[in-house]
Amino acid sequence: EAGVAQSPRYKIIEKRQSVAFWCNPISGHATLYWYQQILGQGPKLLIQFQNNGVVDDSQLPKDRFSAERLKGVDSTLKIQPAKLEDSAVYLCASSLSGLAGPRITDTQYFGPGTRLTVL
Amino acid sequence: AQKITQTQPGMFVQEKEAVTLDCTYDTSDPSYGLFWYKQPSSGEMIFLIYQGSYDQQNATEGRYSLNFQKARKSANLVISASQLGDSAMYFCAMRESRGTDKLIFGTGTRLQVFP
Protein backbone atom coordinates (compact mmCIF):
# COMPACT_ATOMS: atom_id res chain seq x y z
CA GLU A 1 0.00 0.00 0.00
CA ALA A 2 1.44 3.36 -1.02
CA GLY A 3 1.94 5.90 1.73
CA VAL A 4 1.15 9.59 1.87
CA ALA A 5 2.95 11.43 -0.92
CA GLN A 6 4.15 15.01 -0.68
CA SER A 7 6.00 17.35 -2.99
CA PRO A 8 8.28 19.11 -3.13
CA ARG A 9 10.53 17.75 -0.40
CA TYR A 10 12.47 21.00 -0.06
CA LYS A 11 11.73 24.59 -0.99
CA ILE A 12 13.70 27.77 -0.49
CA ILE A 13 12.04 31.11 -1.16
CA GLU A 14 12.45 34.73 -0.22
CA LYS A 15 10.02 36.49 2.07
CA ARG A 16 6.92 37.87 0.40
CA GLN A 17 7.08 35.19 -2.28
CA SER A 18 4.39 32.54 -2.74
CA VAL A 19 4.74 28.79 -2.37
CA ALA A 20 2.47 25.78 -2.74
CA PHE A 21 2.72 22.26 -1.36
CA TRP A 22 0.94 19.19 -2.66
CA CYS A 23 -0.26 16.10 -0.82
CA ASN A 24 -1.77 12.84 -2.01
CA PRO A 25 -3.18 10.79 0.88
CA ILE A 26 -3.37 7.04 1.20
CA SER A 27 -6.02 5.67 -1.13
CA GLY A 28 -9.42 5.52 0.54
CA HIS A 29 -8.52 7.80 3.44
CA ALA A 30 -11.32 10.28 3.98
CA THR A 31 -9.56 12.61 6.39
CA LEU A 32 -6.57 14.73 5.46
CA TYR A 33 -4.51 16.93 7.76
CA TRP A 34 -1.86 19.59 7.26
CA TYR A 35 0.54 20.17 10.14
CA GLN A 36 3.28 22.74 10.61
CA GLN A 37 6.39 21.65 12.49
CA ILE A 38 8.75 24.41 13.54
CA LEU A 39 12.28 23.33 14.43
CA GLY A 40 12.45 21.94 17.96
CA GLN A 41 8.69 21.57 18.34
CA GLY A 42 6.04 18.97 17.74
CA PRO A 43 3.71 19.28 14.77
CA LYS A 44 0.79 21.69 15.06
CA LEU A 45 -2.44 21.20 13.10
CA LEU A 46 -3.14 23.85 10.49
CA ILE A 47 -6.22 22.42 8.79
CA GLN A 48 -8.24 19.22 8.67
CA PHE A 49 -10.45 18.03 5.80
CA GLN A 50 -13.13 15.37 5.95
CA ASN A 51 -13.51 14.37 2.30
CA ASN A 52 -13.49 17.80 0.63
CA GLY A 53 -15.00 19.75 3.53
CA VAL A 54 -13.04 21.67 6.17
CA VAL A 55 -13.45 20.30 9.71
CA ASP A 56 -10.97 22.47 11.58
CA ASP A 57 -8.96 25.44 10.36
CA SER A 58 -8.86 27.32 13.64
CA GLN A 59 -5.04 27.54 13.65
CA LEU A 60 -4.60 28.38 9.99
CA PRO A 61 -3.34 31.98 9.46
CA LYS A 62 -6.00 32.74 6.93
CA ASP A 63 -4.54 36.07 5.89
CA ARG A 64 -1.69 34.25 4.18
CA PHE A 65 -2.40 30.52 4.21
CA SER A 66 -5.00 28.72 2.14
CA ALA A 67 -5.74 25.09 1.46
CA GLU A 68 -8.07 23.13 -0.71
CA ARG A 69 -8.98 19.53 -1.27
CA LEU A 70 -10.84 19.32 -4.51
CA LYS A 71 -12.63 16.05 -5.26
CA GLY A 72 -11.84 14.82 -1.75
CA VAL A 73 -8.51 13.28 -2.69
CA ASP A 74 -5.31 15.26 -3.01
CA SER A 75 -4.77 18.63 -1.40
CA THR A 76 -2.77 21.82 -1.87
CA LEU A 77 -1.53 24.17 0.84
CA LYS A 78 -0.49 27.65 -0.24
CA ILE A 79 1.34 30.47 1.51
CA GLN A 80 1.08 33.94 0.03
CA PRO A 81 3.04 36.01 0.95
CA ALA A 82 5.55 34.03 2.99
CA LYS A 83 7.18 35.39 6.15
CA LEU A 84 10.41 34.39 7.82
CA GLU A 85 8.50 32.67 10.63
CA ASP A 86 6.89 30.32 8.10
CA SER A 87 10.16 28.41 7.87
CA ALA A 88 9.18 24.93 9.00
CA VAL A 89 8.41 21.41 7.87
CA TYR A 90 4.90 21.04 6.49
CA LEU A 91 3.54 17.56 7.10
CA CYS A 92 0.52 16.04 5.47
CA ALA A 93 -1.28 13.14 7.13
CA SER A 94 -4.34 11.05 6.38
CA SER A 95 -6.59 8.69 8.27
CA LEU A 96 -9.23 6.21 7.24
CA SER A 97 -12.18 7.49 9.33
CA GLY A 98 -15.68 6.08 9.46
CA LEU A 99 -18.87 7.31 7.83
CA ALA A 100 -19.52 9.48 10.89
CA GLY A 101 -16.09 11.03 10.73
CA PRO A 102 -12.78 10.32 12.42
CA ARG A 103 -12.75 7.97 15.40
CA ILE A 104 -10.51 8.27 18.37
CA THR A 105 -8.70 5.08 17.36
CA ASP A 106 -7.96 6.24 13.81
CA THR A 107 -4.25 6.34 13.21
CA GLN A 108 -2.90 9.27 11.26
CA TYR A 109 -0.26 8.32 8.70
CA PHE A 110 2.21 11.00 7.72
CA GLY A 111 4.02 11.84 4.54
CA PRO A 112 7.73 12.72 4.35
CA GLY A 113 7.03 16.45 4.70
CA THR A 114 8.16 19.54 2.84
CA ARG A 115 10.96 21.52 4.41
CA LEU A 116 10.39 25.23 3.71
CA THR A 117 13.09 27.82 4.22
CA VAL A 118 12.11 31.48 3.92
CA LEU A 119 15.04 33.87 3.49
CA ALA B 1 -6.96 22.54 27.79
CA GLN B 2 -5.21 19.43 26.67
CA LYS B 3 -1.48 19.22 27.02
CA ILE B 4 1.30 16.73 26.37
CA THR B 5 4.58 16.98 28.28
CA GLN B 6 7.81 15.26 27.36
CA THR B 7 10.43 16.27 29.90
CA GLN B 8 13.43 14.54 28.35
CA PRO B 9 14.89 16.57 25.50
CA GLY B 10 17.51 13.88 24.88
CA MET B 11 18.26 10.32 25.90
CA PHE B 12 21.20 8.01 25.31
CA VAL B 13 21.04 4.22 25.37
CA GLN B 14 23.47 1.49 24.50
CA GLU B 15 22.59 -0.94 21.77
CA LYS B 16 20.56 -3.96 22.98
CA GLU B 17 19.50 -2.20 26.17
CA ALA B 18 15.97 -1.07 27.00
CA VAL B 19 15.00 2.58 27.28
CA THR B 20 11.93 4.42 28.58
CA LEU B 21 10.76 7.69 27.09
CA ASP B 22 8.47 9.68 29.35
CA CYS B 23 5.15 11.27 28.46
CA THR B 24 2.55 12.85 30.70
CA TYR B 25 -0.73 14.33 29.57
CA ASP B 26 -3.52 16.47 30.85
CA THR B 27 -7.16 16.19 29.80
CA SER B 28 -10.62 16.34 31.34
CA ASP B 29 -12.09 14.11 28.65
CA PRO B 30 -12.64 10.56 29.95
CA SER B 31 -12.23 9.17 26.44
CA TYR B 32 -8.97 9.79 24.64
CA GLY B 33 -6.26 8.11 22.66
CA LEU B 34 -2.51 8.27 23.08
CA PHE B 35 -0.05 7.79 20.23
CA TRP B 36 3.70 7.54 19.85
CA TYR B 37 5.47 8.51 16.65
CA LYS B 38 9.08 8.20 15.57
CA GLN B 39 10.65 10.87 13.39
CA PRO B 40 14.03 9.97 11.89
CA SER B 41 16.26 12.59 10.33
CA SER B 42 14.46 12.06 7.02
CA GLY B 43 11.48 13.88 8.54
CA GLU B 44 8.64 11.40 8.16
CA MET B 45 6.49 10.73 11.22
CA ILE B 46 6.21 6.97 11.69
CA PHE B 47 3.37 5.60 13.80
CA LEU B 48 4.59 3.23 16.52
CA ILE B 49 1.87 2.42 19.02
CA TYR B 50 -1.60 3.40 20.26
CA GLN B 51 -3.27 3.24 23.68
CA GLY B 52 -6.93 4.00 24.32
CA SER B 53 -8.02 5.43 27.63
CA TYR B 54 -10.40 2.53 28.23
CA ASP B 55 -7.97 -0.20 27.20
CA GLN B 56 -7.47 -2.62 30.06
CA GLN B 57 -4.04 -3.77 28.99
CA ASN B 58 -0.93 -1.89 28.04
CA ALA B 59 -0.36 -1.77 24.30
CA THR B 60 2.53 -3.66 22.75
CA GLU B 61 3.89 -3.68 19.20
CA GLY B 62 6.98 -5.76 18.70
CA ARG B 63 9.84 -4.11 20.60
CA TYR B 64 7.60 -1.20 21.61
CA SER B 65 5.36 -1.22 24.64
CA LEU B 66 3.43 1.50 26.35
CA ASN B 67 3.49 1.80 30.14
CA PHE B 68 0.06 3.35 30.65
CA GLN B 69 -0.68 4.64 34.15
CA LYS B 70 -4.05 6.32 33.92
CA ALA B 71 -4.21 7.65 37.46
CA ARG B 72 -0.84 9.36 37.00
CA LYS B 73 -1.75 10.45 33.47
CA SER B 74 1.41 9.02 32.06
CA ALA B 75 2.01 7.01 28.89
CA ASN B 76 5.68 6.14 28.72
CA LEU B 77 7.15 4.38 25.70
CA VAL B 78 9.45 1.45 26.38
CA ILE B 79 11.78 0.30 23.62
CA SER B 80 13.38 -3.06 24.32
CA ALA B 81 16.61 -4.31 22.77
CA SER B 82 17.54 -0.94 21.27
CA GLN B 83 19.01 -0.88 17.79
CA LEU B 84 21.15 1.74 16.08
CA GLY B 85 18.23 2.43 13.75
CA ASP B 86 16.12 3.53 16.72
CA SER B 87 18.06 6.79 16.88
CA ALA B 88 15.45 9.45 16.10
CA MET B 89 13.05 11.95 17.62
CA TYR B 90 10.10 10.43 19.44
CA PHE B 91 6.81 12.26 19.88
CA CYS B 92 3.94 11.51 22.20
CA ALA B 93 0.52 12.72 21.03
CA MET B 94 -3.04 12.72 22.30
CA ARG B 95 -6.45 12.92 20.75
CA GLU B 96 -9.65 13.59 22.69
CA SER B 97 -13.05 12.17 21.77
CA ARG B 98 -14.86 15.49 21.88
CA GLY B 99 -14.25 18.46 19.64
CA THR B 100 -12.07 17.94 16.63
CA ASP B 101 -9.87 14.90 16.45
CA LYS B 102 -6.60 16.69 15.95
CA LEU B 103 -3.50 15.27 17.51
CA ILE B 104 -1.76 17.37 20.14
CA PHE B 105 1.95 16.64 20.18
CA GLY B 106 4.62 17.00 22.83
CA THR B 107 7.96 18.63 22.12
CA GLY B 108 9.66 15.30 21.55
CA THR B 109 12.64 13.37 22.90
CA ARG B 110 15.76 12.78 20.85
CA LEU B 111 17.01 9.23 21.37
CA GLN B 112 20.54 8.29 20.45
CA VAL B 113 21.59 4.65 20.45
CA PHE B 114 25.31 4.01 20.66
CA PRO B 115 27.22 0.76 19.99
Image (spheres, coloured by chain):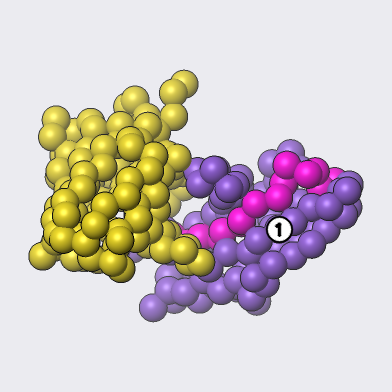
Chain colours: A yellow, B purple
Depth check: A82 or A119 in front?
Answer: A119
Name the residue at 34% across, 60% down.
Answer: A87
Q: Secondary structure at mark 1?
A: strand
Count all numbered tags in the image, as a single digit: 1
Name the amino acid, label 1.
Leu
Residue B29 in sight? yes
Q: Please, which chain is the residue tagged with disc 1 on?
A: B
> Which quadrant would residue A82 be assigned to in this image?
bottom left
Q: Position of residue B60 (x, y in %)?
A: 70, 46
In the rendered view, tell whether residue B56 sits above or below residue A98.
below
Lateral position of residue A75 relative to residue B83, left or right: left
Name the residue at 39% across, 53% down.
Answer: A89
Pick the quarter of the image with the N terminus of chain B.
Answer: bottom left
Lateral position of residue A4 relative to residue B88, left or right: left
Q: Which residues are magenta?
A: B81-97
- Residue closest to the far top: A1
Residue A18: in magenta span: no
Q: Position of residue A74 (x, y in %)?
A: 24, 33
Q: Position of residue A16 (x, y in %)?
A: 16, 61
Kindly identify which residue carries mark 1.
Answer: B111
